[in-house]
Image: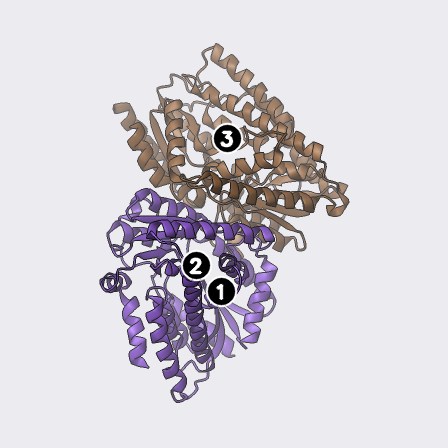
Amino acid sequence: MRETIQEFASVIEEPYVWLAKAKKTTDRKVIGCFPMYVPHELVHAAGMWPIDLVGGNGEMTAAAQYLQNIVCYPMRSALELLLTGQLSALDGAVFATICTAGASGGEMWRNLNLLPYYHQLVVPRKAGGEGTLQYFTSQIGRFKSSLEAFGGRAISGEALADSIKLYNRSRSLLQRLYEVNRRNPEALPPQDLAVVRGAASLMPREEYVKLLSKLVEEVEAAPTSPRTERVPMVLVGSICDLPQIEILSVIHAAGGAIVEDDSPLGRRMLLPVTENGDQMVALAQRYVDTPPCPTKCDATLDANFAYLVELTKSAGAQGLVFLRPLYCDVLGLDYALLSGRLTQAGIANLSLDLNGREGASGQVQTRMQAFVEMLRR
Amino acid sequence: MEPIKMRYLTTQREKMSPMVRSYWAELDQANELGRPVVYCLGMVPQEVFRAVDAAVFFGENFGAGCAVARVSEELCDVTESRGFPVELCSYIRTHIGAMATGRNPMGKTLPKPDMVAYCNSRCTAYAGWGKAIQELFPGIPALAIDVPPMRDDVSRDEYNQASAHVQRQIEEMIGFLDGWKGHRFDHARFEEGIDNTGKGGRAFVAFQDTLRTKPAPISLIDIFIQLFPMVCLKGQPEVAEYYLAAKAEVDQRIAEGFSAVPEEKFRIYWDGIAIWTRLKTQFEQLARHKAALVASVYAFNMADSVTHYDPARPVESIADGLLNGFTNRGLQAKIDYVSRMVTDFEADGIIMQVSRSCKPYFLDEYAVMKEVVKRTGVPYCEVQGDMADPRLYSEQEIENRIDAFLTRLAAA
């Protein structure tokens, strides 16, 4: 089991070094998709290799010519990687217009014209109503045509059906790992689960599913580890990037157990795509059906609050931890409001600010320890 | 040395000041009179709400007003003490603080809203702002218009799809209002409002275009101050009347050869939002260097989104305005727009003000300015500021940078 997890870890240690090497073994075009709402299934069905455009480490000097240091980390970091040639494995990029940064940042990529392919996927920032579904379906159709033009071949209904099945399979396997982590965090600590989840952002899905199936079997067959008394909690938020492994380790080390999460590339991404009916509508419907997201202007606070309370109660959690990315107004506003409401409702919560990948500072560790101790009392 | 004073327009004092007072008086009384109050944020079409005789409160103007009245800082503090991040838009922080405390330096009190309405064409933080208002005034509805961003290479088909998406939401909004709290949606009043907004926008453009004259008869600061009718009274007939009167006064100044900055030597294009806490200081500092502020993307682009308004196709007019608003456009469109302003208003220098809490303005400001400078050859300097939170910048640093820049311009 450890060896299998290590295989996933080797992918995300230095994602773009790994990617450049892995690309040599395939002639598939690699398409970087800005995290969250780009349907990878469509890229996959076009015979290409979709990855989540995750950030990198280190200084951001090249990007500073274009973006101020008060722009969110994922956007600055991705641009830095592009400008410094670290994304040489990419053949194209897709940006979804989920926020101001997503729309404007994507425009910079298009203007820089450093990659052979660029597409802006217009995502309606409204979930409800027949109009939204109709509009997003048309935008997914436009994305499909654009991929077909770039790939020089049509995306057949069969190919897309296969891709949707493959991605759904990967989601259901991940769901099983989540269950193990929830039941027994000693057997599969959150930081390990995050490694596995993070590798999904990069690996070709066929290989990922193969390795994931192996891991699920290993984990489920492993003898039950002795249980440690832990404080169950829900993790909400994160940056649009790989999971925050260091912070997850801090939570685990402090005696917390993440029994539910609502983070951008976490559990909310496990929602499957319907395998019957019109495929374009099914891809659009999945977006409409995702749990309330602060980027959607009609996702009311009532709905989001009810959703978090339900997550907390159904998982038997004692508290919530908000991971708030700096310079993200969308999450900054919602989390402050939700935190206030949860406190009023008697649900303990802690907000931690994330400045890119700065990781778990001493202050974060201390606050986390204090939070766990408080919940224990 | 005695500072060079700004000479404000008589029209502003005699006509706009009473308009401001009556706007706040109307809002002060609305709750008592049972008239619905709608908090409008961003470019949401106010004309729609006036068609049910609502009193319209405009969020951004409130933030700017509080900054001018020097209370925004303390209101931002209140908001931050409630757990909101300091880097959040200072208009939003100011407004949340005001709602929490009931403070309103412009009126007697802050009217209680019956509804909040916004659109996200400029900024995705509006959704959270709307939720914050609902949190402080529980039970009120929020109506939103989602506006897809428009890239430079958007096809006709794609534009039409986006326009249909926006128009459908405006129609839904109208449908909701018709019958809301027993009000009937007055279509004739709506069309009249659209007509008035179009006329108001065109009159504003004529007023702002007086700044093309050399020497500049007014300052950009005059334009900033006199944004009020256009942004707060959208849809009202007095908007066009006001700007035509203001323009007539400026025309008189031009005929007399009046120069807002004595012995004008440089013309400066200002990129970014006004720093509302230092309008007077800014004029005086630049005037010392014989530099006149003559144009800005902020303010100027607001009229552009409404000059085409046609009462014969009101909903489509609004959709076109929202989709083509400056901050909703692609990078090349922004570069073209700013370059054109710099050239048309014959700017000798550019001051790029980075409003540290306004993402829609600062996000691609570097990328835009890089190209504008390349294209126009006009030098620029950067200052880090903010529209309403003076804690986000250093007054001294702004002053030093502008002084150094203008000294360099003089030496060139």
Labels 3 and 2 share a subunit: no
Please say if the residues under marks 2 and 1 sit with CB atoms less than 8 Å apart: yes
Whether marks 2 and 1 lie on the same chain = yes
Residue type marked 3? Asp
Q: Quadrant of residue A337?
A: bottom right
For marks 2 and 1, give the CA distance: 10 Å
Q: Residue at x 43, y 27 (%)?
A: B295
Q: Give the residue displayed 38% in from the left and 72% down from the top.
A: A250
Residue at which label 2 appears: A39
* Residue B69 visible here: no
Residue B279: image x %, image y %?
Answer: 47, 32
Q: Would you place residue B124 above or below residue B271 in this image?
A: below
A282 relative to A230, above or below: above
- Visual hue assigned to chain A: purple
- How many numbered marks, from 0 up? 3
Quarter of the N terminus of chain B within the rendering:
top left
Residue toward you, A120 or A69: A120
> Residue B126 location in percent, x, y?
53, 48
Chain displayed in brown: B
Mark 2 residue element: loop
Q: Are marks 3 and 1 in contact (CB under 8 Å)?
A: no
Q: Few, some or many C-alpha atoms within 10 Å of disc 2 (few <14, some 14-19, many ≥20)?
A: many
Numbered disc 3: what chain?
A: B
Q: Distance of mark 3 from mark 1, alpha carbons?
A: 42 Å
Circle 3: element type: helix
The disc label shown at residue B304, or none: 3
- Which of discs 3 and 2 lies nearer the camera? The answer is 2
Q: Which residue is mark 1?
A: A273
